[in-house]
Image (cartoon, grey):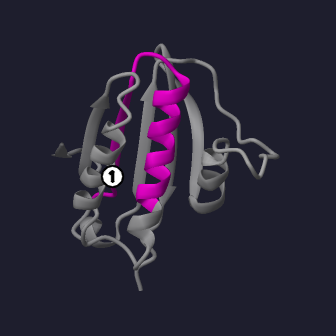
Amino acid sequence: MAIESERGPALSKRLRGGELPGVAEVRAGLRELLRHWGEPGRRDVAELLASELVTNALVHTDGGAHLTATLGAGPGALLCGRLRVEVRDFASRHPTPRVQVSEEGTSGRGLMLVHSLADAWGVRAHGVGKAVWFELDARCG
């Protein structure tokens, strides 16, 4: 669901625990929010990283997740604002990127992608759980 936040245009989506089909809905909502945003390829990176954070929250925690995506405020935010995506869950355990992942493994690469592709990212305590976030610059002009 698209909303207007204090920071600028935003997307907010709640997902129940184990609701993996909701990951596709998050991607679609983000695609709509970012339809005119950033240089070519930046929307794809945003979708990939948001998918990774949401999937991690749904697979590795109980109680679901809440995603918010916001673009910086101002008249050019929809085109060139800084994007911040935050996924909150209800587990206090902080994730850490895996240093080595088996070539045959099907998991364990999500946070390494976030670490490699985001302009900034982190984890912070939030109420009864945590929020994992990343930021991307639009890289306009």
For the N terminus, give its image quadrant.
Answer: top left
* The one of 52 and 42 positioned closer to us in this rendering: 52
**Residues drawn in magenta:** 46-73
Query: In which quadrant of the rendered view does residue 138 lie?
Result: bottom left
For the C terminus, give its image quadrant.
Answer: bottom left
The residue at 60%/42% (across/down) is 122
What residue is pinned by disc 1? 27
Image vertical order of residue 74 relative to residue 3, above or below: below
Q: What is the x, y in percent for residue 4? A: 18, 47
* The one of 76 and 111 positioned closer to us in this rendering: 111
The residue at 37%/73% (across/down) is 38
Image vertical order of residue 16 relative to residue 70, above or below: above
Q: Is residue 26 left or right of residue 52?
A: left
The residue at 71%/44% (across/down) is 105
Query: Per the image, is 51 magenta?
Result: yes
Label 1, secondary structure: give it. helix
